[in-house]
Amino acid sequence: MSKRIYLDWNATTPLRPEARAAMLAALDVAGNPSSVHAEGRAARRIVETARQALAKAVGAQAASVVFTSGGTEANALALTPTASHPRLLMSAIEHASVLAGGRFAPEAVGIVGVHPSGLVDLDDLASKLAEGPPALVALMLANNETGAIQPVRQAAEIVHAAGGRMHVDAIQALGKIAVDLGALGADSLSLSAHKIGGPSGVGALIVQGSGIADPLLRGGGQEQGRRAGTENLAGIAGFGAAVRAAEADRLAHTQVIETLKDYLEVRLRRTANVQIFADGVARLPNTTLFSAPGLNAETAVIGFDLAGIAVSSGSACSSGKVQASHVLMAMGAAPDQARGAIRLSLGWTTTEDDVQCTIEAWRKLADTLLNP
């Protein structure tokens, strides 16, 4: 069988060798991180070393890092109502784990619109903040489908001026662009290991200030009382190793990946009236979401797969069945466009040959699917 080409890095990434090595080493450590004996202290060192690596990567204090089972739990933990922030506002293009609303009652949740460009409407945000008591606002740093980088800093200034708090889902951004908690003006930040070459099943919430008033999981004092349950030692070790490697890769290889993405988009535009979404705004260096008149996403994904290329129709969290993209619908795209978009996301092993093969596969698919 010929080599397959993987262009679905926004869904999940291959495990980095550094993460694998760290996980295998952690599996040989018998201690519980909460135990005070030598074995327990060895396990605790692994957890704290990873905690420091995550904090350094996003410009936070190590004590502000809470390890979770993944990005979904991190978002759910952040989206907790308090007496001072009894309502939640979120952009219409958030990940499903944010759109679920955390522990806010549905009537306490409001949606902020986005422009056709894919960026949040800051005027709508300000207007909705003025309609009620101070709110917790959730805004992702980079959209997982279009790659559009959101104006988080400007949004945070608006939110804080209205007495609100700002939660930023940085899961898709980490390892691709710089993520700095202070520069963003965020009060909390969610991260996930498997988007940067770490293992699935581990994530983190970075919390500024007083922290989490009401933990999701109770019954133990782990994570400074903010998340009960014995820590996933191997997963956390892999997360720490992955974030160090991802940051080194970002500094060294981002321009290479972006050059490949730009070349891919130039070639895509030469066929079948291709539209690339969020084309006019800053995007992640690896992400292209495109459509063409008459394109059926499910058929196209299968066609790419048969050609040996893994791509996505959008967010992997809803890909059991291809549905209209809520992101594109929020941007004002026509229903057929929202159902027919294909996402290509590149990564650190993507080569020029991979991109060229993808272009050739698209040409053949376009001839078949768009000109039957």
Image: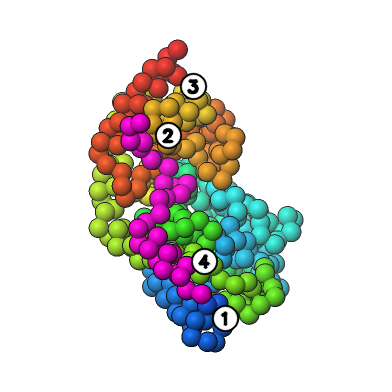
Amino acid beneath label 4: Ala
Secondary structure state at the residue bearing disc 2: strand
Query: Comparing marks 3 and 1, which lies closer to the viewer?
Result: 1
Q: Are marks 3 and 1 in contact (CB under 8 Å)?
A: no
Q: How far apart are marks 3 and 1 (CA)?
A: 57 Å
Q: Nearer the viewer, mark 3 or mark 4?
A: 4
Give the extent of the magenta segment. 1-30
Q: Real-space Cα distance between discs 4 and 2? A: 31 Å
Report which residue position mark 4 lands on.
204
Label 3 crowd bin: few (<14), some (14–19), many (20+), radius 10 Å:
some
Q: Which quadrant holds the C terminus?
A: top left
Question: Which tag, 4 or 2, sits closer to the chain's start?
Answer: 4
Q: What is the CA distance from the residue labelled 3 to the residue labelled 2?
A: 12 Å
* Residue under label 2: 290
Q: Give coordinates of residue 197: x percent, y percent.
A: 40, 56
Mark 2: amino acid = Phe
Query: Where residue 146 sits in the image (x, y, percent)?
Result: 45, 43
For the question of whether residue 33 can be seen, the reply is yes
Residue that label 1 marks: 34
Task: Report, in whole angstroms, how far the alpha carbon at label 4 lies from the one at label 1.
Answer: 19 Å
Q: Which of marks 3 and 4 is nearer the N terminus?
A: 4
In the rendering, at what x and y percent does residue 17 appear? 35, 58
